[in-house]
Structure formats: structure tokens, C-alpha cells
Image (tube, grey):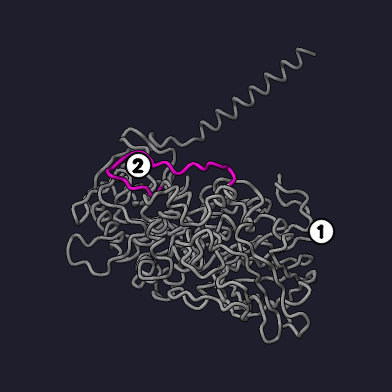
């Protein structure tokens, strides 16, 4: 018996060793296939940007350049130190490109002063008139003149902030720039990306990110600045304990985070923010563009949609493609894309994207290989879990319909006829609705598909629900929120969630769900916030007149979701979402400079009468 066990153990060791050896053989050694050199590339104003260039060892042919510009470091530094992987995917790395990485101006090892989402300078009269577009141009110009074995074509890509730099490279593009893929790119930090949505501060992200990234760098460095370490692992309790937003600066940052000070100084949509909008500058685009976004990206899904539309509207002849999958922020590059939290998608969507979309795009435009088989818009449809190909986005065959809130918590395509006039709830800034039921110091990406029953049962959340659907119903494109509300205060936030309610007998769609069983699971399809004082103008905020019925309209980011037969559609409305979003004091004040005493309870009403209906306007697939 002992001998049998020993044989079994030896067999397991042999199999494990064989698996390790197989993986080692499959592992791609960057240092074996690429030569690395580091350069300090001069810009037109004399500043030098630190750049690493990885060139294939095989010099029997020429290669296109594939470049990423980043504020997050191009480490490891040193010509003998190699990245473990190169490019946007293993496929491009193994196919062979000249990979270029650059620390942007003022970050890490590059010279100059850093500026967050540096504005585009339309007029450049002297060498000192620089921006991210000119830095990209100057870098490409140097590369095509100095890097051997280049075929003269350049591609540009990046995710999140590097996606912003990729998008800026489209403006006044160098003639050698042929293909650009802005992925989760920032478009507007006040309207819908990262740190503000419709004027409301995304507190948790802004605090965690800027506490480190926002620190001033006195001189070039290879090290990172450390962010603030939470004194309580529960950010709900920690940030609630800090009190008013102004206390973050006085007690923690002590006015040392420059961009935090900028946000506080520009609490409405003034010229500071307008100058930093990307989409409005994309008027003469010549390279081919493939913009990528994630349906469950909590940070930057606004950017991909608006950048795609701006290029489409202002450059009708440009090769312009939109790819959207069921991904969290950057999930197409960092995962298999089979699931997010408890929700599965029935296939490895990210691997499909990397193999059949991204590699094809760069291969065609930079190497003249293959054919442009990617449609105008390739958008994954959740619920049915299939990829859909469209000639434009949103698709043409959509019927605009209104999903009305009705009495007794019902939701219907039929308008209200009477009955009760409103639903109300008390919103208390000192007991805000949490954005998640879990405890995470950093915002958890899975909250985008998290079961919303933890909020459904709260008295300060109102819900409306359809009957059980007899047939599949697919909603596609942007969603317009139309609320008729009143408040006893003078300001209020309104968070609206569109939710797919699973049947009571639903089974888990992933191997190891966090929450089980899944019967009655409330899966969010789209959620976002509107800061009420900006309901008529983001430039000129207005107070609410207490107890007066007031219309609040805003747009939720696009969806492409099939509500299956047997499911229900739900809408939840609430007025806090903490600490994802900072608390609204519910008094009309400059929130960045509000005092603790300004935060007060208020009663909000959601009306659903024929004269004052509340509804979501949706795109129904015919």
C-alpha cells in the first residue's frame, strides 16, 4: 500500500515537472528575440523624453514601430533589463514589431514639467508651444530617422491614460503614423471619465489615485511616489470619518496635490475643463483608428464612445472602428474575458479580441498583411452573450421607447394614468447608500455586475420593476434618464441603475460565483449619477427650489443587452453612492469648500403622473 502511494506521488511529481517544463518551453524570452536600447529624444523646446526601443534580433527584414506613451513608467530601466512581455499582446510580440515605450513629459525619467491631461495648443508660434500632440509628432519624427530596420510606419496604442496619449497623437498626426488604437481613453474628466461623472466627484478613485500620482516630481526618477495608506481598510468608514471634502485637503493632502487643488478651484465646467476635452479637437484625423471600450469599465467608457463619435462626425472618410466588449477597465488586455464577478459571458472574449481584432488591425495597417475584416462597430451583446457586427453605432434599426415609472413600484412601456403621484425617501448624507456590499480599500471592479439586493432593501432606494418578460427584449445604445423630482433641500444627486433581474430558479453562469444561489440576482446593466445642480447647465449650477417639481435629465453610457424571457427589468433610484461618489450636502454650496454643517438630510420625491412622468428613454431593437 505504501509502495502504491509512493508511485502515485512520484507520478504526480513527474506530471507537475512536465507541466512546468512545457510552460517554460512555451515562455517567450524577450531578451532572446529583441535588442533593447534607451534614448533621450529631444523635443522642439529642447526637453528630452526618455524612451526605450526594443528591436527584433532578426534584422533580415524591416518592421513597423508600435509605440506606447505613458505616465506610469516604462520600467525596467537599463539596456540590459527587459520587460517580460512587449506590445499590446503576446501575438504582436511574437509576430515582430519595433516596440517603443516612452515616459511622457515630466514623468519618471523624462525631462520637463508634467501637466494632467495637458490641453492641446492649437496655435504653435514658438518652440515652447508644446503639447502631447507635438511631443508625439517629434518622437515619431526622430524614430523614423534614427531607428534602423523600420519600414517607416508607426502605430500608437495605450489603455486608460496611455489611451489618452494615443488619442492626442491623432491631432496633427505625423505622416508616418498609420494606425492608432486609443483603448479606454480619457476624453473629459468632468463630464464622464474617471474623476467626475456629470459633475459629481468620484471620490474613492480620485483620492486613491491622486494621493500618489498627483505628487510633484522635482527631477527625473526611476521610483514611484507612494499613495496615501488608509487608516481603516473600510473606505466607507474611513472617508465618512474624514467628513466634508474640504477636510481631505486640510487634514491629509495639506494642499500638496496640485491637481486636487485644481479640481477644487474649478468645481463647475469652466474653461479649465473645456480646454482638456479631447473629442472636440479630433477634426482632421488621417490615421486609421480603432477605439476600444468595456461595457463594465467603471473608469473610462465615456471616453471611447465620445472619441469614436467625434471622429465619425468630423472625419467621415476616416477608417474609424469601435470595439466594445463585456470588460472591466483594460480587461481585454488583462484577462480571458470569460466573466466579471458572478456573471459569465460564455466565451473567452478578450482572447478573441486580441487574436482576431487587435492583431488583425495592426497587421493590416502597419504590415499590409491580411484584410480589414473588422466592421465599423463590433459590440458584444450581454444577456445573449454574442458578438454583434454593425455598420454604424448606435445601429440604425432602433425604436426609441419610454420605460415609465408607475405606482406600486411597477415599470412599463405604458405611461402613468393616475393613482399615487410619487414615491419618496429620506436621503441622509451621514448614512449614505454604499456602492458595494464588499470591503475594498481600492474600488473593486466587480461592483459593475454585483447583485444590487444589498441596496434594494434600503429605505433610501426606490425601485420599479416590470412583469416577467414573455419574450427576449434587447436594449441598445444610449439611455436618457428623465426624472421629475422634488426635494426639501436645495441640491441633490440622482443615481439611476438599469438592472436585469434573473429568474428565481437561475443557476450560476460561472464555475465559482462569489454569491450563490443566483435566483433573483439583480445584475446592473448600466449605472451612473447626476449632480442635480448641473441639471440645466454644467457651466452655471442652479439650486433647487424646495418642494417644487423639477425635471432632471441626463444620459447614461450606451448598452447592448438582451433581457431574456423569464427575466425582469428593474430601475433603482437613490441619492448617494458612497464612497464611490462624494456625498452631496443637499444644500446649494460649492461642495469642494463645504463645511460639515452643510451636510443635511432631505426628502426627495420621484413623480410618476401624466403631467410629471419619470422614465428612461431606451433604444429597442426592432
The residue that label 1 is drawn on is 504
Q: In the displayed structure, does residue 495 sit left or right of residue 518?
A: left
Per the model, the C-alpha gap separating discs 2 and 1 is 56 Å
Please, which residue is most extreme toward the bottom here?
611
Q: Quadrant of the C terminus?
A: bottom right
Q: In the displayed structure, does residue 101 sit left or right of residue 528?
A: left
Q: Quadrant of residue 606?
A: bottom right
Q: Secondary structure at mark 2?
A: strand
Q: Which residues are magenta?
A: 213-234
Residue in the image at 50% along x and 53% along y: 205
Q: In the displayed structure, does residue 402 sit left or right of residue 536?
A: right
Residue 273 horizontal/vertical position (percent): 39, 67
Please, which residue is most extreme toward the right here?
505
Magenta: predominant secondary structure element?
Answer: loop
Query: Is residue 214 in the magenta section?
Result: yes
**What mark, if any, has residue 56 been given in the picture?**
2
Residue 382 horizontal/vertical position (percent): 65, 62
Above or below: residue 543 compared with residue 388: below
Residue 502 horizontal/vertical position (percent): 76, 60
* Comes first in the chain, label 2 or label 1: 2
Residue 13 horizontal/vertical position (percent): 64, 22
Amino acid at each position: 500500500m505504501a509502495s502504491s502511494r509512493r508511485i502515485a506521488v512520484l507520478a504526480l511529481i513527474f506530471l507537475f515537472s512536465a507541466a512546468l517544463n512545457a510552460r517554460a518551453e512555451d515562455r517567450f524570452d524577450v531578451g532572446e528575440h529583441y535588442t533593447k536600447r534607451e534614448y533621450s529624444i529631444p523635443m522642439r523646446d529642447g526637453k528630452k523624453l526618455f524612451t526605450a526601443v526594443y528591436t527584433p534580433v532578426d534584422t533580415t527584414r524591416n518592421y513597423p514601430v508600435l509605440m506606447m506613451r505613458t505616465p506610469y513608467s516604462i520600467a525596467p530601466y537599463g539596456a540590459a533589463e527587459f520587460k517580460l512581455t512587449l506590445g499590446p499582446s503576446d501575438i504582436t510580440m511574437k509576430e515582430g514589431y519595433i516596440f517603443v515605450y516612452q515616459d511622457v513629459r515630466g514623468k519618471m525619467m523624462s525631462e520637463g514639467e508634467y501637466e494632467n491631461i495637458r490641453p492641446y495648443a492649437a496655435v504653435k508660434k514658438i518652440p515652447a508651444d508644446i503639447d502631447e500632440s507635438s511631443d508625439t509628432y517629434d518622437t515619431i519624427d526622430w524614430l523614423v530617422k534614427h531607428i534602423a530596420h523600420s519600414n517607416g510606419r508607426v502605430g500608437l496604442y495605450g489603455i486608460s491614460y496611455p489611451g489618452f496619449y494615443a488619442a492626442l497623437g491623432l491631432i496633427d498626426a505625423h505622416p508616418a503614423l498609420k494606425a492608432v488604437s486609443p483603448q479606454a481613453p480619457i476624453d473629459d474628466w468632468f463630464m464622464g471619465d474617471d474623476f467626475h461623472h456629470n459633475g459629481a466627484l468620484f471620490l474613492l478613485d480620485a483620492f486613491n489615485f491622486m494621493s500618489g500620482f498627483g505628487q510633484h516630481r522635482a527631477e527625473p526618477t526611476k521610483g514611484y511616489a507612494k499613495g496615501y495608506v488608509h487608516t481603516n481598510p473600510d473606505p466607507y468608514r474611513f472617508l465618512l470619518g474624514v467628513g466634508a471634502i474640504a477636510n481631505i485637503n486640510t487634514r491629509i493632502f495639506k494642499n500638496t496635490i496640485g491637481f486636487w487643488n485644481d479640481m477644487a478651484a474649478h468645481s463647475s465646467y469652466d474653461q479649465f475643463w473645456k480646454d482638456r476635452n479631447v473629442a472636440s479637437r479630433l477634426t482632421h484625423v488621417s490615421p486609421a483608428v480603432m477605439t476600444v471600450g468595456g461595457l463594465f469599465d467603471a473608469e473610462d467608457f465615456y471616453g471611447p464612445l465620445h472619441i469614436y463619435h467625434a471622429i465619425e462626425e468630423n472625419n467621415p472618410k476616416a477608417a474609424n472602428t469601435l470595439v466594445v466588449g463585456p470588460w472591466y477597465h483594460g480587461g481585454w488586455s488583462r484577462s480571458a474575458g470569460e466573466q466579471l464577478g458572478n456573471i459569465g459571458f460564455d466565451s473567452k472574449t478578450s482572447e478573441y479580441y486580441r487574436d482576431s481584432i487587435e492583431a488583425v488591425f495592426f497587421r493590416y495597417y502597419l504590415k499590409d498583411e491580411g484584410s480589414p475584416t473588422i466592421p465599423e462597430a463590433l459590440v458584444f451583446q450581454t444577456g445573449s452573450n454574442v458578438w454583434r457586427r454593425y455598420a454604424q453605432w448606435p445601429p440604425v434599426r432602433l425604436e426609441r421607447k419610454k420605460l415609465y415609472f408607475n405606482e406600486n413600484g411597477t415599470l412599463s412601456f405604458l405611461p402613468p394614468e393616475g393613482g399615487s403621484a410619487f414615491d419618496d425617501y429620506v436621503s441622509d448624507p451621514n448614512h449614505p447608500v454604499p456602492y458595494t456590499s464588499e470591503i475594498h480599500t481600492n474600488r473593486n471592479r466587480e461592483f459593475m455586475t454585483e447583485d444590487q439586493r444589498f441596496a434594494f432593501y434600503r429605505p433610501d432606494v426606490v425601485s420599479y420593476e416590470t412583469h416577467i418578460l414573455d419574450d427576449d427584449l434587447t436594449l441598445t445604445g444610449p439611455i436618457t434618464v428623465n426624472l421629475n423630482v422634488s426635494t426639501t433641500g436645495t441640491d441633490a444627486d440622482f443615481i439611476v441603475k438599469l438592472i436585469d433581474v434573473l429568474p428565481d430558479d437561475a443557476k450560476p453562469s460561472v464555475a465559482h460565483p462569489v454569491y450563490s444561489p443566483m435566483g433573483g440576482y439583480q445584475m446592473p446593466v448600466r449605472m451612473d449619477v447626476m449632480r442635480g445642480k448641473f441639471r440645466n447647465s454644467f457651466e452655471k449650477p442652479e439650486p433647487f427650489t424646495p418642494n417644487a417639481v423639477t425635471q432632471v435629465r441626463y444620459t447614461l453610457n450606451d448598452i447592448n443587452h438582451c433581457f431574456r424571457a423569464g427575466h425582469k427589468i428593474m430601475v433603482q433610484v437613490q441619492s448617494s453612492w458612497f464612497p464611490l461618489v462624494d456625498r452631496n450636502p443637499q444644500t446649494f454650496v460649492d461642495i469642494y469648500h463645504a463645511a460639515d454643517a452643510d451636510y443635511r438630510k432631505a426628502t426627495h420625491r420621484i413623480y410618476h403622473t401624466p403631467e410629471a412622468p419619470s422614465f428612461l428613454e431606451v433604444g429597442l431593437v426592432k
